[in-house]
């Protein structure tokens, strides 16, 4: 049904600063609309996002063009449904994360 296609959803996501609510601090351009997004508690310049099409994307805001994904999961090894939560796992490196979806997988 074309009414529910991802083409109708806005793809851009924005990071706002509550002190300056008139303009976004950063615009993210994921390959598919983001359903969830989390900052890394050990490195606040890195984020992980869960997309409508099941992809997990990583962002580094320190990079030039930090709004485009630094890395993205491959579609064959991603979720088959939208991702509804992503979270960073406490580890020595601080760069491991997990994602959950209604497809019954935790990746």
Image (cartoon, rainbow, N blue to C red):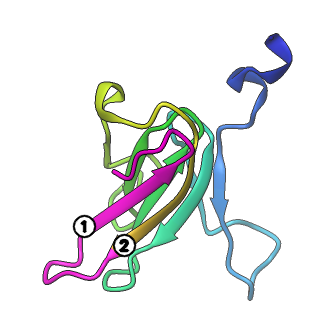
Q: Which residue is outermost to the front?
A: 104
Q: Residues within 10 Å of mark 2 (few under 14, many from 20)?
A: some
The quarter in which the N terminus is drawn is top right
Please determine whether, in this image, residue 56 is positioned above or below residue 75.
below
Distance in Å between CA atoms under marks 1 and 2: 6 Å
Residue 78 lies in the magenta-colored region: no
Residue 79 position, x and y percent, is 43, 37
Which segment is the magenta one?
89-107
Residue tagged 2: 88
> Which residue shows up at 75% across the image and 67% down it?
23
- Residue plotted at (23% across, 70% down): 95
- Reply above or below: 75 against 41: above
* Residue 92 belongs to the span the image colors magenta: yes
Q: What is the quadrant of residue 6 in the picture?
A: top right
Question: Which is nearer the eye, 80 or 19?
Answer: 80
Residue 100 at what x, y percent from top left? 47, 54
What secondary structure is the magenta-colored segment mainly?
Answer: loop
Q: Is disc 1 in contact with disc 2, using a CB cutoff of under 8 Å? A: yes
């Amino acid at each position: 049904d074309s009414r529910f296609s991802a083409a109708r959803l806005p793809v851009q996501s924005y990071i706002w600063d509550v002190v300056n609510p008139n303009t976004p601090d950063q615009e993210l351009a994921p390959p598919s609309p983001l359903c969830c997004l989390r900052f890394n508690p050990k490195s606040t310049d890195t984020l992980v996002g869960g997309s409508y099409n099941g992809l997990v994307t990583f962002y580094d805001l320190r990079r030039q063009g930090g709004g485009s994904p630094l890395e993205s999961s491959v579609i064959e090894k991603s979720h088959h449904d939208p991702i509804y939560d992503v979270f960073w796992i406490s580890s020595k490196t601080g760069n491991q994360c997990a994602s959950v979806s209604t497809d019954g997988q935790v990746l």
